[in-house]
Amino acid sequence: MQLTNQKRLAARILGCGVHRVWVHPDFTDQVASAVQTEDIREFIEEGWIKAKPVKGTSRVRARQRLEQRRKGRQKGQGSRTGSSNARNPRKQRWMKTIRAQRRILKDFREEGTISPNQYRRYYLKSKGGSYRSIAHMRSQMEIEGVKFKGGEN
């Protein structure tokens, strides 16, 4: 039996698509005999006709993947999209290193490890990119004869 017209009417009443209309299999004969909208409304009230729930995309797998990524997994060469600069921008790297170096230089100047003249010299050198890291800067300072407190040199 054909329920095309009945499903169309039910879809309009329920405010959903035709494919979401569900008709109870035991009452298909009664529903097929319905011609008017009033009959369809009655069947909806009786529960013979219902709207199926909207199907969504499950986020379970996405959440699991995110959890693994937070642990550092699934970040290999095949998973990467975007250049290395897009993933970890050069500017961000530079800001991280230069700010750390400047902070250390400021501390050295305040505690008297280096004089203001030396501070200016090392500040400009770090600005020019002479030092890869704080450790590199300290080793260069030691070579040039700066004595650090708590050190054995």
Image (cartoon, rainbow, N blue to C red):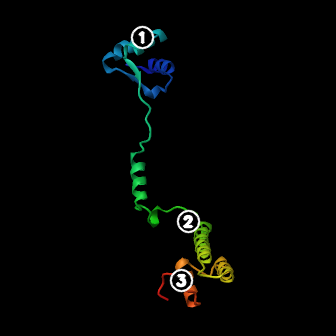
What whole-number distance in Å separates the C-alpha atoms at marks 2 and 3? 33 Å
Q: Position of residue 124 (x, y in %)?
A: 68, 79
- The residue that disc 3 covers is 148
Please tell me whether residue 72 is drawn above or below residue 66 in the rendered image.
below
- The residue that disc 1 covers is 42
Contact (Cβ within 8 Å) of mark 1 with mark 2: no
Question: Quick one: label 1 or label 2, which is nearer the N terminus?
Answer: 1
- Look at label 1 and name its amino acid: Glu
Please tell me whether residue 134 is drawn above or below residue 64 in the rendered image.
below
SS class of the residue under badge 1?
A: helix
Please tell me whether residue 100 is drawn above or below residue 66 in the rendered image.
below
SS class of the residue under badge 3?
A: loop
- Look at label 3 and name its amino acid: Phe
Q: Which of marks 1 and 2 is in front?
A: 2
Q: In this view, does 60 lie to the left or right of 8?
A: left
Q: Which residue is drawn at 37% across and 13% down?
A: 46
What whole-number distance in Å separates the C-alpha atoms at marks 1 and 2? 62 Å
SS class of the residue under badge 2?
A: loop
Question: Quick one: label 1 or label 3, which is nearer the N terminus?
Answer: 1
- The residue that disc 2 covers is 88
Q: Which of 102 and 19 is in front in this view?
A: 102
Q: Which of marks 2 and 3 is in front?
A: 3
Q: Which of 131 and 10 is in front in this view?
A: 131
What whole-number distance in Å separates the C-alpha atoms at marks 1 and 3? 90 Å
Is disc 1 surrounded by few (<14), some (14 to 19) or many (20+) residues within 10 Å? Answer: few
Q: Where is residue 113 in the image (x, y as percent from the top left)?
A: 59, 81
Q: Which of 94 and 145 is in front in this view?
A: 145
Question: Quick one: label 2 or label 3, which is nearer the N terminus?
Answer: 2
Can residue 88 be seen in this snapshot? yes
Q: Where is residue 91 in the image (x, y as percent from the top left)?
A: 62, 67
Q: Residue 84 carries which label?
A: none
- Look at label 2 and name its amino acid: Asn
